[in-house]
Image: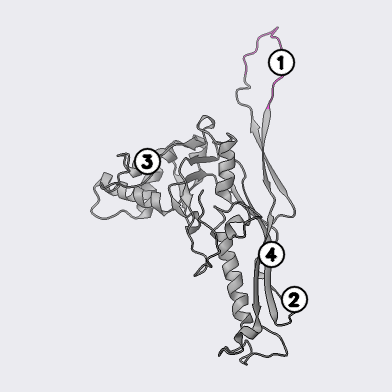
Amino acid sequence: MKVKGKDKEISTRRKAGVLRPYVPGLTLGEQQELVKFFEAVLKPELTYSELNDNITNYREKNVISNQGEMLDNKSKKHPLELLILKDIVTSYTEDVIFTMFFAERDTNVASPLTSYTGFFPKLDLLLTAGEIAATKGNFVTTGAFNTSAQEGIGSDGNNNYDRLVEFVKSGHPLLRKGEVLLYAAENPLSAARDGLRRKMQYVEYPSTEQMLEKLRSDANSPGLKLATHEALGTGNKLMLTKPGMLDFGVGEQDDKNFVQVRNPYKDPNEVQFWIQNGYDTRFKDIHEKVFQTNEQTNTGLDLAGDYRDSTDTGEAEG
């Protein structure tokens, strides 16, 4: 969603148990708190992408320019401008996608993973603050979905399909009612399919859709849908949410497609390509009626681009 400056989302929590028996002469007027509030903020932090190159680097190379001509010393135009314009937008967008769950802003470190703060670090803050906890009904311990030598069986001896059923079934009845999204990476879904095959003694592996259909029935969640993507990385992190609980905020939605090409230095042969935009994430609400997660973590996949410089930093966890 497009955000100008800062956007606040305030969820109202209604007090339960306000019904009382009435009799004449009852003492009235006792002060009671009726509502509480949960505030979630989106404030996109500015990010950028910069590429600097000297056009004379291509003087001795057999490079055809954008107009089908060799390097022109007079125009000072980069001979690979069109290619760079396309690739820098693609790489910038991939960096945003594959860090949206793992990034944690740190202006002292130059990396996609420090450019803004993604969903999993925000989740860790809510866990630390006690907003997500077993006592609040939005936190469930599942154990890992790692398989042992026995197909479909976790390292603790439990069937991984049953493990997934119990996680979904642990959700609040109003969370499981209607459409609900299960965010999961490939590992727990594959492990659960293996577990279902063992449990049902299938000759062939059940398809993901077959497993999902049975999961809906076994977990009493007929509107359950899978939300899975490479951006979730690898690992056993699960999130069960109502649609619309995860917001991704941008300063200007089309800024990622706009690249400045300029000669900003004293040396006119230096060409700079520059993109900038703001990004932020938030959980709109984490009440048990709309959200549930487990204790596991994921590790981000390095899928953006085709290679890294030796100066690029670390892996993502969340």
Residue positioned 56% across, 57% down in the render: 99
Tell which tag, 1 or 4, sits nearer the viewer: 4
Residue type indicated by callout 2? Tyr
Circle nearer the N terminus (1, 4): 1
Disc 1 to disc 3: CB gap under 8 Å: no
Circle nearer the N terminus (2, 3): 3
**Mark 2 residue crowding within 10 angstroms, few (<14) / some (14–19) / many (20+):** few
Residue type indicated by callout 4? Gln
Residue 259 shows in this picture: no
Kindly report the secondary structure that dominates the magenta region of the rendered protein: loop
Disc 2 to disc 3: CB gap under 8 Å: no
Residue positioned 31% across, 39% down in the render: 158
Q: Which residue is mark 3?
A: 163
Circle nearer the N terminus (1, 3): 1
Which x, y percent locates residue 169?
A: 43, 37
Choose between 88 and 217: the one closer to the eye: 88
Residue type indicated by callout 1? Glu
Residue positioned 32% across, 39% down in the render: 156
Measure how far apart labels 1 and 4 are at the Cα level. 55 Å
